[in-house]
Image (tube, rainbow, N blue to C red):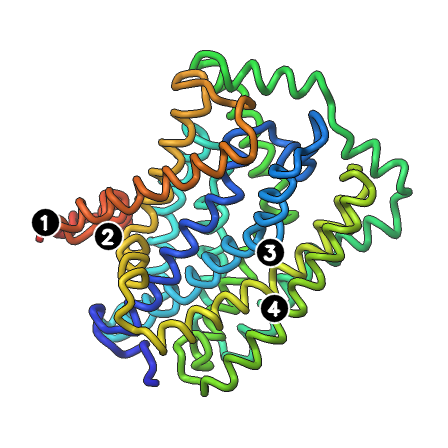
Amino acid sequence: MTSIGNETPGSDRLVFIDSLRGLAILGILVMNIQAFGRVEDAYSLPNIHEPLSTLDRLLHGIGYFLAEQVFVGLLSCLFGIGIWLAAQRAQMAGHDPVVQQRRRSIGLLLIGLIHAYLIWTGDILVPYALAAWILAPSVHWSRRRQWQIGLAFLAVIPALSLLEIVLIPADVRSAVYAADPNAFTLEIDALRGAWWQNQSWRFSRTLEMHLVGIPFGTFWFVGGWMLLGMALFRLGFAAGQWPRAAYWRCLLLSVLAGLAFKATSYSYQSFHQFDPETLVLGRGVLSYLGAACLTLSTICLAILCWQRWPTFLLGRGLAAIGRLALSNYLLQSLIATSLFYGFGLGWFERLSFGQLFLVTIGIWLVNAAFTALWLRYFRLGPMEWLWRWLSRRQAPAIRR
């Protein structure tokens, strides 16, 4: 197979990248829906209120094994590929790729800040924009350097987790991560309340995540995958250039390793009834490593499927969603907050895992319908148009 780096935007290779991006956008909702519909601590402590039913335990386990940190890793990897492709286009047009990327990052940052502070605290756009701005010069790095620094970035979180295990006693960690019933009540009241109550709670939590969560966690995760995405693409791996046998071997090894890490993590946490003290080793190390392996296996499986069935309808449908990735991501937030928060239907902390799963499918269907209808009349998604306008300071053509 040939490289996609020098092909036209309508080529099959770029359609494949869009398909992966569409898969990632839909996949991240599997875990995000828990953050939309349940208190913050329930994301990592699923039995925080009461023991899980058999069905809830099954659905939580499926999400834990197949989605947690997997699709956000995939999306970050694809974002890195996008940075590389944009850099190649900038160079061909005689522009400085670093300057161009930093302009794009500022545009995305503005959209992300509005999303984070006015719509949803779980925003990923601000970390993406900051990481892309800082790592913009990486488009001039060698593949080896991108690969090495990307792996080093990804190693930061498990390294900090292991350091925490060594330096901080288990009882202290348990007390730090223990759930606070009063905090639950405040969160539920705020998110089920009027918009101004919701906004007050969101502002303080979002500010904390930006000041603490990004520099000590999210930046290293998304930045690492961005760098690996560039390196994997330039190596031909993410462009589908390697022999099918190599992808099958990589798929087998990464699935086995990923499921082994995930199974060990889930068993360890389940055995201890998801005690808060198990979070550091269970999620910060074991689940984290398993997700990295499963992200790689997802890329391998997608490439094998695309090579075998390049005109498969589902793949083309995912590609359309991927072309409108930013718009579909923000649409998910608008729908979910309208369903769960007090200014909408107020379903927050009222649905089981099974019901959350049905809501997820419903939002996927809305994403698909919106995409099909919008692309019938327009070339760019509404938020993609806004991003380009903010980045280039001129309005791009949007109608077909």
In this rendering, the count of numbered labels is 4
Q: Nearer the viewer, mark 3 or mark 2?
A: 3
What crowding class fits label 3: few (fewer than 14 Cα within 10 Å), some (14-19), or many (20 or more)? many
Q: Please, what secondary structure does the residue beneath circle 3 have?
A: helix
**Residue beneath disc 2:** 392
Q: Nearer the viewer, mark 3 or mark 4?
A: 4
The reply to whether callout 3 and callout 1 are in contact (CB within 8 Å) is no
Q: Is residue 217 above or below residue 241?
A: above
**Residue beneath disc 1:** 399
What crowding class fits label 2: few (fewer than 14 Cα within 10 Å), some (14-19), or many (20 or more)? some
Mark 1 and mark 2: span between their CA atoms?
Answer: 18 Å
For marks 1 and 2, the one nearer the N-term is 2
Q: Residue at x 61, y 47 (%)?
A: 215
**Residue beneath disc 4:** 255
Q: Nearer the viewer, mark 3 or mark 1?
A: 1
Which amino acid type is shown beneath numbered disc 3? Trp
Q: Which quarter of the figure has residue 58?
A: top right
Mark 3 and mark 1: span between their CA atoms?
Answer: 38 Å
For marks 1 and 4, the one nearer the N-term is 4
> Is residue 123 visible in the rendered structure shown here?
yes
Q: Nearer the viewer, mark 2 or mark 4?
A: 4
Q: Nearer the viewer, mark 1 or mark 2?
A: 1
Mark 1 and mark 4: span between their CA atoms?
Answer: 43 Å
Q: Is residue 93 above or below residue 174?
A: below
Q: Please, what secondary structure does the residue beneath circle 1 have?
A: loop
